Image (cartoon, rainbow, N blue to C red):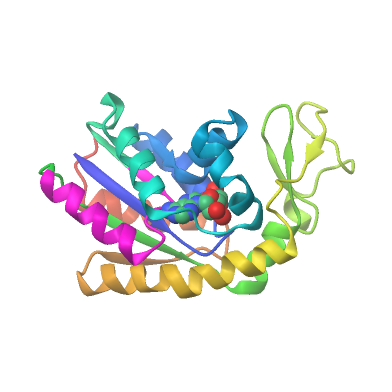
Amino acid sequence: MKSIILLSPPAAGKGTQAQLLKEKYNIPHISIGAILRNEVERKTAVGLNIKEDMKKGNLIDDDIIMNLLINRIKQKDCEKGFILDGFPRTLKQAKLYDKFLKENNMELNYVFHLKIDKETARKRIVGRLICSNCQAVYNELLKETKPKASGICDKCNGILVRRKDDNNDVFENRYQLYLIETMPVISYYQNQNKLYEIDSSIDKNYTFKQITKILDIGGDYN
Ligand code: AMP
């Protein structure tokens, strides 16, 4: 049983790395953000409650997060391990998660902090476009991932759309929350000698190589 945590400021590529890790090690990718967005889309009681905070990029209540997370981890496909993308984002979540692991005789194995400077992160967020048809991700501000025709997906000709929370004000709010709420989580894991610092400012392949090098040395994933 292996568990991996990916922590980072917004736009450091947690989602991308989690997908790559899922493919390589065949363990599920748990994105708390995606679970929350799904609640909002389905207009569940939780979804209606969190809708406005999600739009603003505010952090969602720790108890709501813990309930959704624990329900997901208890599913059968998580038995071999899982990748947590965007959790824990507060010290309270980290401590509640430690308690849950202990009560369930589970171990926390790897915590990766994907590092990126603020301006690079801002460009990635503010320019990000997603294909409404095939979910391919582009960036109109970055040469290497700009769509060939403005607003149209290169792969399927679908319409490119912006995520509701991908704008400058929301970015600032999320970045501040990362500094105030998530940096203490990073120190918490550092003090337990569980943290690996990863440079995530170059490209996704370089980031992935650094992560898998660590996992393959210490891991029993095969
Ligand atoms: P993400 O998909 O990771 O970028 O997260 C999108 C949004 O979901 C965040 O801006 C928060 O509003 C919310 N969110 C995701 N993970 C958490 C968490 N661990 N704690 C509180 N809120 C979260």
Residue 208 visible here = no
Q: Is residue 164 left or right of residue 40?
A: right
What's the residue at 28%, 51% (across, down)? 215
From this view, report whether residue 43 is shown above or below residue 164. Answer: above
From this view, report whether residue 76 is shown above or below residue 60. Answer: above
From this view, report whether residue 119 is shown above or below residue 14. Answer: below
Please provide the residue range marked out in magenta.
83-103
For the view shown, which residue lies furthest in the right direction? 149
What's the residue at 22%, 31% (across, down)? 79
Is 3 contained in the magenta span? no
Q: How far across and how far down the image is residue 12, in percent?
A: 55, 60
Q: How far across and how far down the image is residue 47, in percent?
A: 55, 38
What's the residue at 61%, 32% (across, down)? 41
In this view, the residue in front, 167 or 156, is 167
What's the residue at 74%, 35% (across, down)? 131
State the predominant SS element of the stretch in magenta.
helix
Quadrant of res 106: top left
Is 86 contained in the magenta span? yes
Q: Is residue 220 left or right of residue 53?
A: left
Q: How far across and how far down the image is residue 195, in percent?
A: 29, 66
Residue 153 visible here = yes
Q: How far across and how far down the image is residue 179, in percent?
A: 49, 74
Q: Quadrant of the N terminus?
A: top left
Q: Is residue 105 left or right of residue 140?
A: left
